Image: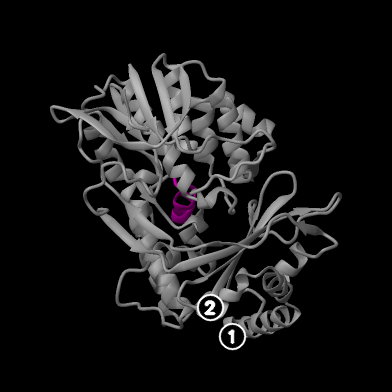
Amino acid sequence: MKVLVLGSGPTGMLVGAALAERGHDVTSVDRDPGPSADGTWRRRGVMQFEHAHGFRPQVADVLQRRWAAAYDAWTGAGAEPMVVEVPGAGTRTIGNRSRRSVLERALRSTASDTPGLTLRTGHVDGLLADGGRVTGAVVDKVPLTADLVVDASGRSSRIDRTTDPELEGLCGLTYVDRTYQLLPGAEPGPMDNPLGSFNSYDGYQVLVFLHEAGHFSVLFVCPTADDALKPLRLDAVFDQACRAVPALAVWTDPDRARPTSPVMVGGALRNVYRSQRRLAGLVSVGDAVATTTPTRGRGVAMAFSQVDALLELMDDGADPGSLVHPFGAWCDEFVRPWVEDHIAIDTDAVARWQGAALDLTGPLTTERICEAAQADPRINEYAEPYWAMTALPTCLQPAEPLARAVYESGWRPSYAPGPSRDQLVTVIHGAASTADGGA
């Protein structure tokens, strides 16, 4: 079978390589030519390439089963499995520490050596169709025919998009981050989970993602509408803000770590779900189907799980022409709920940071239910599969009454030690004034 994959990001390379290894003739098209001769790779249009990432166990699991050579290349480049002890059950791998760029480079180099997979640089002008079936695409004005077209062109996909997303919501959050590397011999800062440190404060959130080889990312997450926190995008202001937050002060101490990037901003974030277009011969995967707030690290896991489901349908003999229907049903059942979940928790987070009281007259968000486990550990039984993404968000519904009882008792989660939003604003504006004076 002849397959044309539109997009050569992680999702496109995975589906392309997996199909090529099954004996299909696959061409993957992307405007990005890959790393340059000197090794640099700017990845224009891929905002998340250098931003913080956490890779859930689904990523490694799918790679090991569907494209083992790429997994070996990734771990060979330094990706570190996170292995934890499970009482009474031995050890379990709960994800991998790695920068996104390390993953993409490993996939790209492996794809380049995969027989049957051709990586082509070009711009997709549009789709080819005959009698209601997609038969290929036009790339740089040249028609390329295929038995199956896979749209893996990402969150900004414009491939034959004639309708609005089925489900969409601004997340209302902006994150500002910077990457660092531990100095030789230095130990990581304080960690409250195997991936790093996640702390909530009055009006904002701080995350630390530990990557491979001592690399790590520090993020401030805040409401997009909070203009007073925007100076965080300045390097000197970001540094001063880190010194004001006790946990970050330890991680970013110049005697412990050095910055490896300027401050980067992730904004205009949207939670989006798009159903399959029901066009014979065409399927969409990855961010072309769904995008969610990156702070929970679900994007790549959801994308790879989609590829896994698509390959399973094909292995079971699904006809390429009608593949869109069973795959669309799978996405509606197993992907859409995560987007709905993100819209609910992001809306609630923004309201909380802006001072709104918890509304107990409506359903509790999954975030609120999980937080209540601090007061009622019985909730953990339901929260663990949710956090691991081994069950859909509805797995928390039986715990909702337990969480509601916790909140009705008057309990509320406490903030981590550190400045409130107003105190942080004072620090930020002082640093910004100093930076402006120095300029």
- Considering every residue shown, the one lying at the far top of the view is 23
Q: How is the image coloured?
A: one colour
Where in the figure is residue 36, as x and y percent of width and height? 63, 36
Marks 2 and 1, how far apart in space? 8 Å
The magenta region covers 381-389
Identify the residue at horizontal 70%, vertical 70% (top origin).
Answer: 242
- Considering every residue shown, the one lying at the far left of the view is 131
Element type where label 2 sits in the image: loop
Element type where label 1 sits in the image: helix
Asked if residue 384 lies in the magenta stretch, the reply is yes
Q: Which residue is mark 1?
A: 422
Question: Can residue 318 be seen from the camera position used here?
Answer: yes
Between 309 and 127, which is closer to the camera in this rendering?
A: 127
- Look at label 1 and name its amino acid: Asp
Q: Main secondary structure of the magenta part?
A: helix
Identify the residue at horizontal 48%, vertical 44% (top origin).
Answer: 300
Identify the residue at horizontal 74%, vertical 44% (top origin).
Answer: 213
Considering only vertical position in the picture, is 281 above or below 420?
A: above
Mark 2: give few (<14), some (14-19) or many (20+) Cα within 10 Å: many
Mark 1: give few (<14), some (14-19) or many (20+) Cα within 10 Å: few
Between 249 and 155, which is closer to the camera in this rendering?
A: 155
**Apparent side of residue 137 relative to residue 352 in the rendered image (left or right):** left
- Look at label 2 and name its amino acid: Gly
Identify the residue at horizontal 45%, vertical 47% (top origin).
Answer: 389
Q: Which residue is mark 2?
A: 203
Q: Quadrant of residue 323?
A: top left
